[in-house]
Amino acid sequence: MNLNEPNGLWEILKIGIPALIVFLTAYFMLRDMLENNQRQREIELQLKNSKLILPIKLQAYERLTLLLERISPQSLLIRISPHEITATDYHQDLLSHIRQEFDHNLSQQIYVSHSLWEAIRGSKENLTRIINQAAEETENEVPAIILSNKIIEIYLNSNDQLIANAITILKKEFSKLG
């Protein structure tokens, strides 16, 4: 077979073109099959991960709800008794308790949205500000109950209901999980 002859070139094209078509068809089909297989594995992995992560996320929402409830002034002032100590000592006890509660739940922020975490952090900072303001407006050596009353007064007169707002945001975000 001589390539210089018109029949020789024609014979090569008759064999080469169908072979090229078969090769390209097989290549693209195999590529698509491998891509679909990879996507299927990724979906299965995501499903498996979501089954593992969902209970952890639910626990995070529970813990953060408990944090907000525990640092709310109504709960905090009842739980930390103001009896038989001075306003200064009570002030320090309250701040210490809030800090411990917050620090204990710090790692939960990786399971919730940034906006929710900022609302929780803002609630803690706002409550700390209220407690510090009440302490500044109260004499140091008076009974702690006076400081407790001052904190409630400032909190109720404040339009910043950040803890209630954070709980609302938390509930909305939680409802999106299901």
Image (cartoon, rainbow, N blue to C red):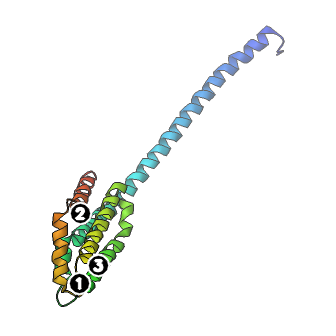
Q: Which residue is mark 2?
A: 163
In the image, what residue type sits under mark 3?
A: His
Res. 55 in view: no
Above/below status of 111 relative to 104: above
Q: Which residue is mark 3?
A: 97
Which residue is pictured at 39% across the width and 61% down the height? 110
The circle on residue 87 is 1
- Which quadrant, please, contains the N terminus? top right
The circle on residue 147 is none
Q: CA distance from mark 1 to mark 2?
A: 24 Å
Residue 165 vs residue 49, the one in the foreground: 165
Find residue 104 and report its image quarter.
bottom left
Q: CA distance from mark 1 to mark 3?
A: 15 Å
The extreme top residue here reads: 6
In the image, what residue type sits under mark 2?
A: Ile
Find residue 106 and report its image quarter.
bottom left
Judge left or right: residue 165 versus residue 34.
left
How many neighbours does mark 2 have within 10 angstroms: few (below 14), some (14-19), or many (20 or more)? Answer: many
Q: Secondary structure at mark 2?
A: helix
How many neighbours does mark 3 have within 10 angstroms: few (below 14), some (14-19), or many (20 or more)? Answer: some
Looking at marks 1 and 2 on the same chain, the residue that comes earlier in the sequence is marked by 1
Res. 72 in view: yes
Q: Quick check: marks 1 and 2 in contact, CB under 8 Å? A: no
Residue 148: percent from left, percent from top: 18, 78
**Mark in the foreground, 1 or 3:** 1
Q: Quick check: marks 1 and 3 in contact, CB under 8 Å? A: no
